Amino acid sequence: MLPRPKKRLGQHFLTDRHYLDRIVAEIDARPGEAMLEIGPGPGALTERLAPVVQPLHVVEIDRELAAALRERFAPGLVVVHEGDALEFDLSALPEGLRVVGNLPYNVSTPLLFHVAAFAPRIRDCVFMLQKEVVDRMVAEPGTPDYGRLSVMLQYRFAMALAFRVPPGAFTPPPKVDSAIVRMEPLREGRRTARDEALFTAIVGAAFSQRRKTLRNAVRSLVDEAAFARAGVDPQRRGETLSVAEFTDLADAAGA
Ligand code: SAM
């Protein structure tokens, strides 16, 4: 029997076998892999992944669900970390970590940023999220979905929508469509900003005032000379800049 879902914890449990099979196939777990599942809930994915990777690490905030998982799975099969995934130190797990899960949608954006901070240690992520969030993650410059989330994640990851999942696959059904996204950290040779805090500030400012020209939106961070050095027209809007152009602008502003 499924536990009574708690809305405030974004609990929508995956109950459709067809979609469970597809997600398990997309993750394609192999023996010996280091794997973390975020938000295992009652364990629909957990029970499929744990026997393969042995042990599967899981982080679950719901005390009752965490206790039930501990009771059901031996520690050699599932290591239950009870707590907030937003505070979970992924560097405590081995490098080459794979991170998976049907994420709690109410904290999906901060969770993505939290996981992204550990990108160098991560092999890949396979997440279920609101389709609308996945659309923003993979959006291209100049499209309505392109924004801060797209730039900040595309700066670190190659990402692709794997497939959509309808509300009826969950109990209770969420109000929105969902999708599986695969994220792979960019490796050697990737373009990085010299000052990542400045890059982050410029991207944030550029999208906090979407209608403004870049000149006005990032006025306090980038002067005219820096625009010229970066070869970026200050009359453009932030939503038209590629990730590489944001990086150029940050490097020029910090020079
Ligand atoms: N994986 C399960 C499934 O597919 O049936 C449950 C998915 S449900 C969408 C999200 C799960 O994340 C819930 O079990 C919820 O308790 C847990 N959760 C919510 N917020 C969390 C947080 N901040 N840290 C860790 N787990 C969280």
Image (tube, helix red, strand yellow):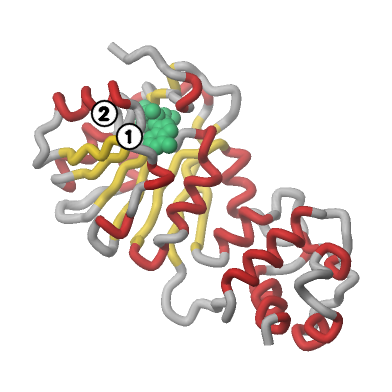
Q: Residue at x 47, y 42 (%)?
A: 180
Q: Position of residue 161 (x, y in %)?
A: 52, 48
Q: Position of residue 122 (x, y in %)?
A: 35, 61
Is residue 147 or residue 32 the one in the foreground? Answer: 147
Bin the neighbour count of mark 2 within 10 Å (Cα to Cα): few under 14, some 14-19, many 20 and up: many
Q: Is residue 250 above or below residue 49?
A: below
Residue that carries the numbered disc 2 in the rendered image: 66
Q: Secondary structure at mark 2?
A: helix
Q: Secondary structure at mark 1?
A: strand
| For the residues bearing labels 2 and 1, Cβ distance under 8 angstroms | yes
Using residue 244 as the reference point, say whether residue 213 is left or right of it.
right
Q: Position of residue 111 (x, y in %)?
A: 48, 46
Q: Residue at x 59, y 28 (%)?
A: 176
CB at disc 1 and ligand 1 closer than 8 Å: yes
Using residue 205 as the reference point, say whether residue 93 is left or right of it.
left
Is residue 135 or residue 25 the one in the foreground? Answer: 135
Residue 60: which disc?
1
Is residue 231 or residue 212 the one in the foreground? Answer: 212
CB at disc 2 and ligand 1 closer than 8 Å: no
Q: Is residue 29 above or below residue 80?
A: below
Furthest residue in direction front, as rendered: 220
Q: Quadrant of residue 1?
A: top left
